[in-house]
Image (tube, helix red, strand yellow):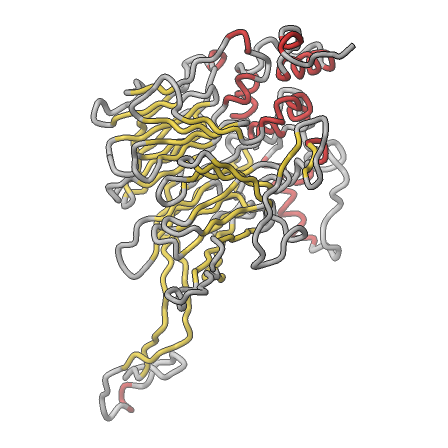
């Protein structure tokens, strides 16, 4: 139940939310006191914990509904409170997280403990005052968006208009208004009339960061479709289709499975998008549909292990990917608690490990290397000794600074740039 | 005589992916011809399906509440046939070859 299932920074990076398999959300807050001092190190401390979703059972369909939090997305801050959307397979909830650091004292009609006074005993009036109290952080569900998805929700994405958001399941994408819970509009429906003809499912969806009419969704067949909501109410017909042509002679049983896109993320600039499939990360220019502009191999050495990865189901692992604040570096996870970063401009990449055994706090991480076969150099790890149960599926990058959050199965690691 | 591990041998070497495919087909000769096809996807869509009788389940829950058993949990080792099954003690469906992880 403590298995982390999603990690997300808010828009300023001050808050970091994690969701887990047990339906809980834990929010961490950055300690910003010494930010201007040269030896500043950010520390994230627990700010709020709450139970977002509970396990449910759909009796009509004999379906168990997991409480696992699939995604969390923050809303841009509009007032003193913070808002986030969290979703499990079937229901999306809007949570309000607010601080209380004052309480009223000196009521005329109530005693300090809340009991009501007899009005006849009151001889004078006073004005109640607000006195400081220990900070209390409260989370309350403000909206519940339910019953709109027959299949399992894999993505939610808040629109740049800050009024609407989309939710995507395997076959459909719905558009919601943040204020309205009893109605949602279906904008994509790829369910075939005859389910026997089903060939692909939706794996992820996201709104464009600036254009409120544009969103993309990725499929299990390795394609990405960009849709424009201005063209029609139902965006079944895409405006752009991004697909890299495949060499038919290279096709194997595994081709389609490893081409399935597990995550799609727009760059902060809105000019590019990044997709993650089983073995690689691809950067696409929105102006070019026929191939990605950059391809980064995450763990190409696994290509010769696909048979066993199929047998132990690892080939179906859904890795996420993320951009850094200025879109110059992309990051994604791998096995053995390794995660990879690719510096787009300098054409450099690095493999690091998130593990308590292999590095101490405040210690600079040592780059790792996996040897594909043959001679193994000292300090390299051979493919066969990789632990495939230690997977890093979820990573997040602070929106401005070089601070990253990396989730192993049960633990959250926060790393930052070396401070000199 | 030296063996040149260069270009000459390249042509006869199968891609690692195809080699893995051959391995898989050797182990599971009956594996479907449409690997990415409907079977795989339909299994994914059906994740979470458990078969039981909700009426029986609720009646059993009510009975347990009334009995107020001293032990923490009722016998969970018995499965269908001996007592009314609950979602928790249904035997885990053995993941078939057409993988279950796609739903996970």
Give coordinates of residue A91: x percent, y percent.
Answer: 43, 40
Q: Residue furthest bottom?
A: A123
- Vertical order, B22 against A75 (above or below): above
Q: Residue furthest front?
A: B1
Would you say A149 lies left or right of A362 here? left
Specify whether residue A129 is in view: yes
Q: Which residue: 46% across, 45% down?
A: A396
Q: Quadrant of residue A385?
A: top right
Q: Nearer the viewer, residue A126 or A162?
A: A162
- Vertical order, A49 against B36 (above or below): below
Q: How many marks?
A: 0
Q: Quadrant of the N terminus of chain B?
A: top right
Specify whether residue A150 is in view: no
Q: Residue furthest right?
A: B1
Q: Nearer the viewer, residue A70 or B62?
A: A70
Would you say A311 lies left or right of A57 here? right
Q: Quadrant of residue B11?
A: top right
Give coordinates of residue A367: x percent, y percent.
Answer: 59, 44
Q: Residue furthest left?
A: A230
Give coordinates of residue A378: x percent, y percent.
Answer: 71, 39
Q: Which residue: 43% across, 60% down?
A: A30
Q: Nearer the viewer, residue A399 or A1?
A: A399
Give coordinates of residue A312: x percent, y percent.
Answer: 67, 28
Q: Nearer the viewer, residue A315 or B81?
A: A315
Q: Quadrant of the C terminus of chain B?
A: top right
Would you say A373 lies left or right of A354 here? right
């Amino acid at each position: 139940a403590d298995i982390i299932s999603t990690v997300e920074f808010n828009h300023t990076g001050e808050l970091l939310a994690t969701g887990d398999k047990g339906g809980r959300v834990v929010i961490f807050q950055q300690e910003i006191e010494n930010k201007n001092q040269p030896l500043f190190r950010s520390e994230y401390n627990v700010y709020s914990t709450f139970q977002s979703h509970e396990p449910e059972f759909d009796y009509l369909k004999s379906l168990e509904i997991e409480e696992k939090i699939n995604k969390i997305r923050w809303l841009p801050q509009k007032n003193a409170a913070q808002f986030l959307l969290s979703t499990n397979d079937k229901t999306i909830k809007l949570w309000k997280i607010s601080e209380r650091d004052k309480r009223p004292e000196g009521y005329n009609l109530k005693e300090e403990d809340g009991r009501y006074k007899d009005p006849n005993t009151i001889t004078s009036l006073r004005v109640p005052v607000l006195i400081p109290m220990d900070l209390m952080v409260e989370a309350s569900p403000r909206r519940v968006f339910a019953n709109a998805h027959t299949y399992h929700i894999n993505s939610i994405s808040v629109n740049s208009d800050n009024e609407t958001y989309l939710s995507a399941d395997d076959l459909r994408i719905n558009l919601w208004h943040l204020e309205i819970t009893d109605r949602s509009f279906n904008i994509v429906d790829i369910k075939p009339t005859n389910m026997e003809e089903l060939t692909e499912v939706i794996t992820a969806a996201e709104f464009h960061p600036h254009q409120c009419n544009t969103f993309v969704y990725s499929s299990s067949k390795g394609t990405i479709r960009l849709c424009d909501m201005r063209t029609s109410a139902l965006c079944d017909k895409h405006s752009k289709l991004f697909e890299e042509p495949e060499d038919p002679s290279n096709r194997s049983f595994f081709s389609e499975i490893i081409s399935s896109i597990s995550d799609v993320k727009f760059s902060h600039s809105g000019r590019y998008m990044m997709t993650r499939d089983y073995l690689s990360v691809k950067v696409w220019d929105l102006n070019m549909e026929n191939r990605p502009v950059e391809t980064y191999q995450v763990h190409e050495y696994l290509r010769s292990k696909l048979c066993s990865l199929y047998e132990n189901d690892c080939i179906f692992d859904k890795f996420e990917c993320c951009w850094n604040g200025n879109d110059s570096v992309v990051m994604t996870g791998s096995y053995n608690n390794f995660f990879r970063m690719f510096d787009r401009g300098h054409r450099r990449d690095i493999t690091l490990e998130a593990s308590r055994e292999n590095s101490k706090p405040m210690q600079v991480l040592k780059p790792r290397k996996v040897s594909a076969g043959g001679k193994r150099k000292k300090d390299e790890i051979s493919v066969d000794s990789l632990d495939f149960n230690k997977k890093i599926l979820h990573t997040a990058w602070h929106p401005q600074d070089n601070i990253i959050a990396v989730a192993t199965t049960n633990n959250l690691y926060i790393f930052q740039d070396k401070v000199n | 005589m030296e063996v040149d591990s260069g270009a000459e041998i390249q042509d006869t070497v199968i891609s690692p992916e195809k080699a893995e495919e051959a391995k898989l087909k050797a182990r599971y000769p009956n594996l479907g011809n449409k690997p990415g096809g409907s079977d795989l996807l339909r299994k994914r869509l059906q994740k979470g399906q458990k078969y039981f009788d909700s009426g029986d389940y609720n009646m059993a829950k009510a009975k347990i509440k009334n009995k107020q058993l001293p032990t923490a949990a009722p016998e969970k080792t018995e499965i269908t046939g001996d007592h009314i099954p609950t979602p928790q003690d249904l035997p885990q469906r053995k993941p078939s070859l057409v993988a279950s992880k796609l739903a996970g």
